[in-house]
Amino acid sequence: MNLSTVSKKTVVDPVCGMEVDPCNNELTAEYEDEIFYFCAQGCLRTFNRNPTKFKKPTTRKKKGIWRRYLDRLNKSTDGKAMKCH
């Protein structure tokens, strides 16, 4: 992927929390007049099964092994956006 084609404005995938470039993304769903963007087909399918679960962004703190994994990954990538799937 050419870095010059990535826009500086990103949105967050409501399922996995990854940053997504809305300009270069065709994986979308509309729910209650709001458009949601997804990083992968699996996240889109999960959202379509129960969109109300993902309607409001949550500020839940990640727990346990997952939090430690993400903290370590963020440290190793200097906080740059990760790719999911």
Image (tube, grey):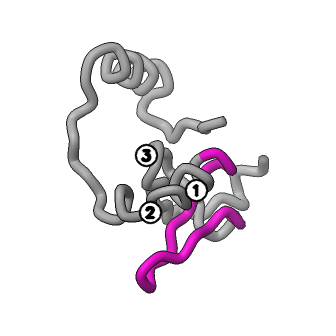
Mark 2 Cα shell of 10 Å, populated few (<14), some (14-19), many (≥20): some
CA–CA distance in space, label 2 to label 3: 15 Å
- Which residue carries the number 2 mark? 51
| Element carrying mark 3 | loop
Asked if 21 appears above or below 60 in the picture, the reply is below
Find out whether the residues at labels 1 and 2 contact each other: C-beta distance under 8 Å.
no
- Which residue carries the number 1 mark? 38
- The amino acid pointed to by label 3 is Gly
Q: Which mark is residue 17?
A: 3
CA–CA distance in space, label 3 to label 1: 9 Å
Q: Is residue 41 left or right of residue 73?
A: right
Give the residue at x 47% y 61%.
Answer: 11
Give the residue at x 53% y 56%.
Answer: 49
Toward the viewer: 26 or 76?
26
Asked if 17 appears above or below 54 in the picture, the reply is above
Q: Position of residue 85 (x, y in %)?
A: 66, 36
Mark earlier in primary sequence (3, 1): 3
Q: Nearer the viewer, mark 1 or mark 2?
A: 2
